[in-house]
Image: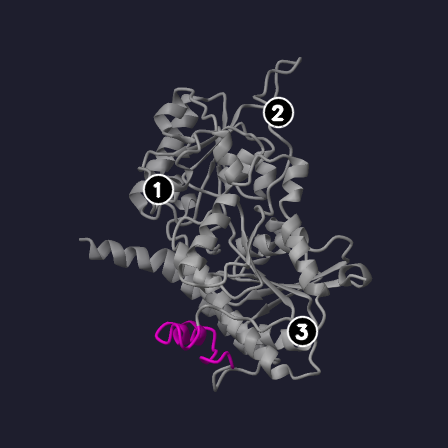
Amino acid sequence: MPVSATKSLRVAVLADSDTRWKWGALTANRIAPEYADIRLDGYLLRGRATPTARQLDEVGVRADALHEVTAVQFLHAVRQEPYDVLVLALVGGGVQAMLHGLGRVQEDGGAGRPKRPVVVTGYVGVVYEKLADGLLLRHGADLVLANSRQDADRFRAVYEGVGADAGSVTEVALPFLGGAAYSGEPGPSAEGGGRPYTVVFAAQPSVPENRRDRTYLLNRLVGHARRHPEREVLLKLRSKPGEHTTHIEELPYQKLVQRLDPPANLRLVYGHMGEVLDRTDLLVTVSSTAALESLHRRIPTAVLTDLGVREALGNHHFVGSGCLASWDQLDAGHRPVPDEEWVSRQGVAAGGAAYDRAFDTARARITELLDRPGDLPPLAPYYTPVTAPGYLPGLLARHHLGPDGTPLPGTPAAGKEPGPVRQIVRRAARGAYRHGVQRVAPVIRRMGEL
């Protein structure tokens, strides 16, 4: 009888930011074999973007257990716990380090060790930069998830182009799509009131990255709110000052907007993106993944061209979507109409049943691997000490691993939690780092431009 039908499924998700925790935990639930009783253990990789309690609460994804760990501590946990599936929700370098570390765990386990877990990885959203670099760093996992048909084709082309096995590439969809379909613009109620027409600007931590462009976007948002006082205009923010997300935010919009005297109908909002989309009539962004969530719900969606259509902004990904527009056009009443073929290739706007079926192939592959007699074959990343001797050792060393995946000498004991003094010092160091990124670094850069 299949494993998934006879016992609970033990799944571990290792994530290095709030966004990747959301992706990893939701993905784990989406790809679990049917009828499996999932126990989900969350591991948050200690670093600059380790989620705060507020960020975790906002994500809204719960785990049966949650731990903050180093890479070496996570590998120690995998040695101790018989996990069935591991989801690596990390940047590419972190995935590569874990693949080599897990390979060493498998080799050191001996004949009596539990069966190697199925290893899954992928991307949080739109892949618009470092395609080859990021993909090759993820090669070696049992499943490399692609969020759309377009991505699956690109991923296979990269792997095949370097002579690597492309069999791990598995087409799915973004795991956080969903919610009610857009029902149309609000109208007045019988009492003469009703919900106001709502425009949401989905901000991004690092796009654009300079003060001039971010201030320009805020000025246009404020201008739109003043031009349309009957509308509610929301600036949807990812994090509060001092918090980090997947990307570093040196110039928080919260601070920039204070100087612009925004009108009363413009408000800053946090919280779950899905809840904000429930009341959205027009979603505006530069290139946020929120655009795909909006398109999935059939909400009018605009990807801004004001700063150009450029790879550095990520909005080049939306070429052909029908969603590209400028603030001038939006101020004048333009509502973009998405191209159906384009959205189909992105795995969005698929509808309830079709969206659920997007994960069928991944579920089937995981079930097959779990039910396979005997142990799974060793993990075989493309990068090895032979293929990348000048690149791989540095990647692994960042996570205190040697070229063979073993912990480097002097690495703190994997199973030992830091004492209270070390915990205080670590929190202070993290706070100092964030202060340096958001306050000191921009000042130094400005001084250098004088």
Q: Disc 1 or 2, which lies upstream in sequence? A: 2
Gap in Å between the C-alphas at discs 3 and 2?
Answer: 51 Å
Q: Disc 3 or 2, which lies upstream in sequence? A: 2
Q: Are marks 3 and 2 in contact (CB under 8 Å)?
A: no
Q: Position of residue 42 (x, y in %)?
A: 64, 63
- Check the image and report above or below for 353 versus 186: below
Disc 1 target residue: 214
Quadrant into which the N terminus falls: bottom right
Disc 3 target residue: 375
Mark 1 crowdedness (10 Å alpha carbons): few <14, some 14-19, many ≥20: many
Element assignment for label 2: loop
Mark 2 crowdedness (10 Å alpha carbons): few <14, some 14-19, many ≥20: few
Element assignment for label 3: loop
Q: Position of residue 120 (x, y in %)?
A: 59, 61
Element assignment for label 1: helix
The magenta stretch spans which residues?
384-406
Q: Quadrant of residue 214?
A: top left
- Check the image and report above or below for 364 versus 406: above
Disc 2 target residue: 183
Mark 3 crowdedness (10 Å alpha carbons): few <14, some 14-19, many ≥20: some
- Check the image and report above or below for 318 versus 168: above
Q: Type of residue at label 1?
A: Arg
Asked whether 208 falls inside the magenta stretch, the response is no
Q: Decide which of 157, 427 is in the foreground and name it.
A: 157
